[in-house]
Image (cartoon, rainbow, N blue to C red):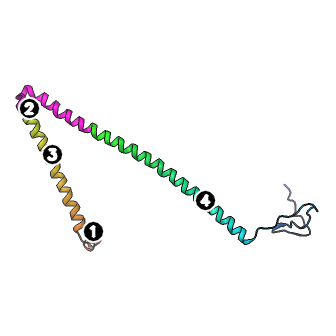
Amino acid sequence: MTQVPNPAPIAGEDPFVGPDPAVGAAPGDQAEPKPGMIDQLRGLYADGREMIDAEIGFQKARIAAAGRQVRTMALLAVVGLILIGCALIALVVGTMIALIPVLGAWGAMAATVVGALVLAGLCLWLAAGRVSKISALFASEPEADASLAAAGGTA
């Protein structure tokens, strides 16, 4: 593979910039004048404005798509919660029907109500424990937590 040496620069051509449009131009060809500073600034402003408008349009479309997804997600969550409620009602009714031969109608009803109340009380007791943990998190002083962390203790 042979290398071709760089040719000597042509008259009127700067080797670093390129050919001079005024030199070597045909007599009928008029070189377009470079735009002035004001024209360049107007073009820059127009380009920037166009980019901003395009970005705003893109973000609007993205927010609209996200809004549709959130609406569908909320609808599906509501339907799911309704179906969970129906399933719990079916569980209570099924438990009463299953207990009727063993305890009788009134006994099955009483056992189901007592069982539901016990489960509700257990859930409320666990929720109250979580509330006290959250209040303890916000009641503690930051310096005390930092000193515990520095000493290697756990909260």
Mark 1 surroundings within 10 Å by alpha-carbon count, few (fewer than 14), some (14 through 19), many (20 or more): few
Question: Which of the pair 91/86 is nearer the observer?
Answer: 86
* Magenta stretch: dominant secondary structure: helix
User: Which callout, 2 or 3, points at the residue further toward the start of the chain?
Assistant: 2
Q: Position of residue 100 (x, y in %)?
A: 9, 27
How many other residues sit within 10 Å of disc 2, few (<14), some (14-19) or many (≥20)?
many
In which quadrant of the rendered view does residue 75 lie? top left
Residue corresponding to mark 1: 152
- Tell me the tag on residue 120: 3
The residue mark sitting in front, 4 or 3, is: 4
Q: Position of residue 3 (x, y in %)?
A: 85, 59
* Residue type marked 4: Met
Q: Quadrant of the N terminus?
A: bottom right
Q: Earlier in the sequence, mark 2 or mark 4?
A: 4
- Residue to which mark 4 is pinned: 51
Of tags 2 and 4, the one toward the viewer is: 4
Comes first in the chain, label 1 or label 3: 3
Q: Amino acid at mark 1?
A: Gly
**Secondary structure type for disc 2:** helix
User: Residue 52 — which label?
Assistant: none
Asked if residue 95 can be seen in this view, the reply is yes
Crowd rating for badge 4 (residues with CA inside 10 Å; few <14, some 14–19, many 20+): few
Which region is colored magenta?
84-108
